Image (tube, rainbow, N blue to C red):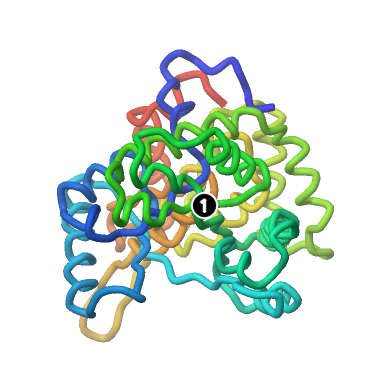
Amino acid sequence: MEMNNHHQGTAEMEKKSKTKIVCTLGPASRSVPMIEKLLRAGMNVARFNFSHGSHAYHQETLDNLRAAMLNTGILCAVMLDTKVENQEGVANFDDILANSDAFMVARGDLGMEIPIEKIFLAQKVMVYKCNIQGKPVVTATQMLESMIKSPRPTRAEATDVANAVLDGTDCVMLSGETAAGAYPELAVQTMAKICVEAESTLDYGDVFKRVMEHSPVPMSPLESLASSAVRTANSAKAALILVLTRGGSTAKLVAKYRPGMPILSVVVPEIKTDSFDWSCSDESPARHSLIFRGLIPVLYAGSARASHEETTEEALDFAIQHAKAKGLCENGDS
């Protein structure tokens, strides 16, 4: 079970959902002020529905999202995903997964193609296979559908979201609830609360064992390091796992093993140079990690020209101070 003896000062961490929230942006939620509210409420990924609206419309929404991120200082990903919509997709799931960076379980589309009584099993199998491959998976369609018009979800909807979290989904998605609903901000807040409550019941030691049973043999040195870090952190009941990364691969491998505590992924500057100039680019891997369960990315604005030793020491100090400021850890925590 996740540690229950957190210090009072880490209450903020306990209220933060490890499961990420995807929001579809639309007429009810595409303005800069509303996007800012969604970001503060817990939105991690913005989804654009390209079956509606013109190119100019979506470009304006994207510009609004960028402005909202700048105003709030909160990162948000825009994700392109693969989804299975029919029986053929279910049958060829393993091949599709092998060629996908992320995956969406689109229950509404599945329900049109396979018997309704089999949807729950298809969802569980697909989420499980994504988990053991370390591929982020989004569970979508009608999760809090009644909140399009009502300020409260039904009990069945709340249970649906919680069960998706218990199944192991990385993200849960809101569609019409945020795109065209009357309560977009409240829908995000409600979903975050349900996720936190569901996560508090998980046995993270058992989750770790299940993923380890399907780990590759032989395991790469990097994955071996990541799995060992999670095992140690779980045993020590650590408050936080801290990962320094450039491209994000290490942090994503740590997330694959589902630790019981948050993972602070500190993206350090990556030097890119040609004959004329130096440049540093690090925001992209930080945004990409937003769809992985439990990962909290933060950009380290250090000098790209600093030595490796200087960068590591300064980034660690920055990360610890950032974690304390966000309530992720305190003095004396593991």
* Camera-side residue of 158 and 254: 158
Instruction: Give the percent coordinates (x, y) of residue 252.
Output: 56, 56
Residue at the bottom extreme, as displayed: 275
Q: How many marks?
A: 1
What amino acid type is highlighted by mark number 1? Answer: Cys
Mark 1 Cα-neighbour bin, 10 Å: few <14, some 14–19, many ≥20: many
Please name whichever residue, 18 or 300, is drawn nearer the observer in this view of the structure: 18
Q: Which quadrant of the rendered structure holds the N terminus?
A: top right
Asked which quadrant contains residue 53, the reply is bottom left
Is residue 318 visible from the viewing direction of this image?
Answer: no
Q: Is residue 64 above or below residue 296?
A: below
Whole-percent x, y for residue 59 in the image: 20, 73
Reply above or below: 93 against 264: below
Compare residues 194 and 238 and report the one nearer the observer.
194
Residue drawn at x 65%, y 28% as measured from the top left: 201
Position of residue 17 in the picture relative to residue 65 (left or right): right
Figure check: 44 above or below 100: above
Residue 222 image position (x, y, % from top left): 66, 59
Q: Which quadrant is the C terminus positioned in?
A: top right
Q: Residue at x 37, y 36 (%)?
A: 189
Q: Position of residue 131 (x, y in %)?
A: 68, 56
Residue position for label 1: 171
- The residue depicted at 65 percent of the width and 34 percent of the height is 233
Asked if residue 239 can be seen in this view, the reply is yes
- The relative height of residue 164 versus residue 91 in the rendered view (above or below) is above
Taking the image as shown, residue 35 lies to the left or right of residue 102, namely left
Quarter location, residue 120? bottom right
The local secondary structure at tag 1 comes to strand
Residue at the (29%, 41%) spot, across then down: 183
Left or right position of 72 against 334: left
Q: Is residue 293 left or right of residue 222?
A: left
